[in-house]
Image: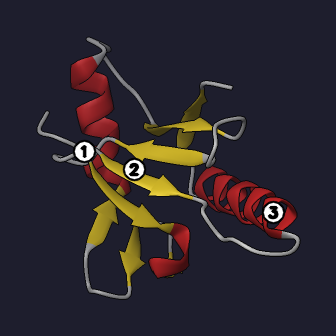
Amino acid sequence: MQTDTEKSFSEILTVDKNEITFKDGEKVSFDECAENFKNVHSLNHSKCVAERDIAAHPPYFLFYTSKRLKLVFDRRGIFSKTKNKKAFIDLQIKIQETGFTTYDLS
């Protein structure tokens, strides 16, 4: 895998059953991430698309794209910790609803 790229969760445009689309047009394919996760961890089958850590500062998902995209929950200001945590959990639920999973590092 190549070096990581990083995006803020505020750059997400949509999340559907196949992918995350960002405002700049970049996409994260869940099928691609699951395939990469399977290969990196020498598994026969996997529906895991990312590692996640809600306890990190800032919380993040690390998607197994070809360049390992780190999606950070980095909103700042009053109530930012609460808003970041809620957005993190909302994304985790959306991913689970698609039938894919994420690996918890926290």
State the separation of the CA atoms marked 3 and 1.
Answer: 24 Å
View extreme (top): residue: 42
State the separation of the CA atoms marked 3 and 2.
Answer: 18 Å
What kind of element bears circle 3?
Answer: helix
Q: In the image, is residue 85 above or below residue 102?
A: below
View extreme (left): residue: 2
Which of the two labelled residues, at mark 3 and mark 1, occupies the earlier sequence position?
Answer: 1
Which of the two labelled residues, at mark 3 and mark 2, occupies the earlier sequence position?
Answer: 2
Would you name the residue on which mark 2 appears?
Answer: 70
Q: Could you say where residue 55 lies in the image, as x and y percent from the top left?
A: 72, 35
Would you name the residue on which mark 3 appears?
Answer: 86
Res. 49 image quadrant? top left
Disc 1 vs disc 2: Cβ atoms closer than 8 Å? yes
Q: Tell me the quadrant of the picture where the N terminus can be found.
A: top left
Residue drawn at (25%, 48%), measured in percent from left and top? 65
View extreme (front): residue: 77
Disc number placed over residue 4 in the picture, else none? 1
Res. 40 image quadrant? top left
